[in-house]
Amino acid sequence: MSSRVPNQARVIPLRPAAERPGTARPASSPPSRGQSTPAPREPLWRDLVGDVLRRERLAQERTLKDVADAARISVPYLSEVERGRKEASSEVLAAAAQALGLGLGDLLAPARTELVRLTAAQQGRSRGASTSPYGGMCLAAPSPWPAGPDRTPCPGGGRRPSGRCRRTGHLDQPPPGR
């Protein structure tokens, strides 16, 4: 005889729910002395993109079925993509974005912004307070051109031979006559 409760499914989670971005950590005792805390996990791209898809769909007051039909994908698959359970291909993401009236870039830009925000917050907690997203480490060389009254120097500082800053991609041209 089984000890399982009838009419109750046995679910084996792929990852604990507390590790999803935006969810609360379970109450637990602090680590004992000599035991280090595990490094915080970076958020998964599929979670971030799924959150953006769901937020946009709900903002438009549309149903999963409506968006899935317009994107020509199944409702369960779209639901799993929104929940971060499936890693959707670029074609599926583009179709879902188009069904919502967005371009692929419009869908991915907010996910990127959220990724930067979350990883910067994690880095700040793990390294201590740092105002730089690079944690004080800069591999770029200083600009070879002086800043003039009509030019503002790039905050990244270092330039490649093409004139683009190594960190920011900012294009800076040499002064006339050079």
Image: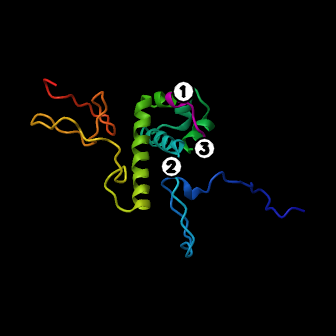
- Magenta residues, start to end: 85-94
Answer left or right for 14 relative to 127: right
Query: In the rendered image, which quarter contains the C terminus?
Result: top left
Which residue appears at 11% of the width and 34% of the height?
150
Q: Specify few, some or many for label 2: CA neighbours under 10 Å numbering under 14, 14-19, or 20 or more.
A: some
Q: Who is closer to the viewer here, 163 or 144?
A: 144
- Which dot, 3 or 2, sits closer to the camera? 2
Which image quarter: residue 123?
bottom left
Tag 1 or tag 3, which sits nearer the N-term?
Answer: 3
Q: Position of residue 33 (x, y in %)?
A: 55, 76
Tag 2 or tag 3, which sits nearer the N-term?
Answer: 2
- Disc 1 to disc 2, how far (Cα)? 22 Å
Q: Specify few, some or many for label 1: CA neighbours under 10 Å numbering under 14, 14-19, or 20 or more.
A: few
Is there a contact, CB below 8 Å, between mark 3 and mark 1?
no
Q: Amino acid at mark 2?
A: Pro
Query: In the rendered image, which quarter contains the N terminus?
Result: bottom right
Q: In this figure, which residue is indicated by the disc labeled 1?
A: 91
Q: Secondary structure at mark 2?
A: loop
Q: Secondary structure at mark 1?
A: helix
Q: In this figure, which residue is indicated by the disc labeled 3?
A: 85
